[in-house]
Amino acid sequence: MANEKINELVNNLSLLPSIGKKSALRLAYFLSKEHSLSLKIAHNIEEVVRFVKPCIRCGNLSDDELCEFCVNENRDKSLLCIVESAKDILIIEESSSFNGLYFVLDEISDDKIDKLRAMININSCKELIFALTHSVHSDASYFFIEEKLKDLNLSFSKIAQGIPSGVSLENVDLISLHKAIAFRTKLD
């Protein structure tokens, strides 16, 4: 009976992103021995499932109707960064490189574009910064959104792409190398 429960836990853990069967097995056995930690994690998961939901304005994850960024008066409301998921917001915030607002564009639909337009108008945004994973789809998204919002007199930009710091050229894919050369910066 215990093996059945462990196997079920292993199967469920392996459904999580970046967790394979071996990692799931290690985690399941660890959790079966660490009762206190396991109960804390179970409680955290329950709390997230019950109380965390998308912000009604930007789509970030929040305990309240509006997320911490939408209600923060110290954020630069003229800048709006478009991301693919709330996870991207956490990554950008950890870099301490941006102090504007965010909008999660997890799908392109008329409803999402209307929400984006409303957010731009509410905050009098001046610049939209696209922080999407580079792909043909994201390039099409840029053009589509620019076309839909061209009447708002916005400046559009996207985050720079190229070679990560500390990576040698032999380990860089050709698209990143092309972007790095095409969008090079001048040295003063």
Image: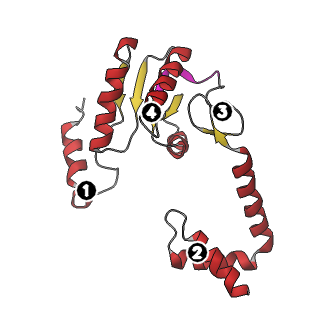
| Residue picked out by circle 3 | 68
| Residue picked out by circle 4 | 82
The type of residue carrying mark 2 is: Asn
Mark 4 and mark 2: span between their CA atoms? Answer: 35 Å
Bin the neighbour count of mark 4 within 10 Å (Cα to Cα): few under 14, some 14-19, many 20 and up.
many
Q: Nearer the viewer, residue 37 or 28?
A: 28
Bin the neighbour count of mark 2 within 10 Å (Cα to Cα): few under 14, some 14-19, many 20 and up.
some
Regarding residue 2, the answer to whether it shows in the image is: yes
The answer to which quarter of the image holds residue 166 is bottom left
The type of residue carrying mark 1 is: Val
Bin the neighbour count of mark 1 within 10 Å (Cα to Cα): few under 14, some 14-19, many 20 and up.
some
The label number, if any, that marks residue 29 in the structure image: none
| Residue picked out by circle 1 | 172
The magenta stretch is: 73-80
Q: Is residue 1 left or right of residue 184?
A: right
Regarding residue 161, the answer to whether it shows in the image is: no
Residue at horizontal 34 percent and vertical 50 percent from the top: 164
| Residue picked out by circle 2 | 11
Bin the neighbour count of mark 3 within 10 Å (Cα to Cα): few under 14, some 14-19, many 20 and up.
some
The type of residue carrying mark 3 is: Glu
Q: Position of residue 93 (x, y in %)?
A: 54, 39
Kind of element beneath mark 1: loop
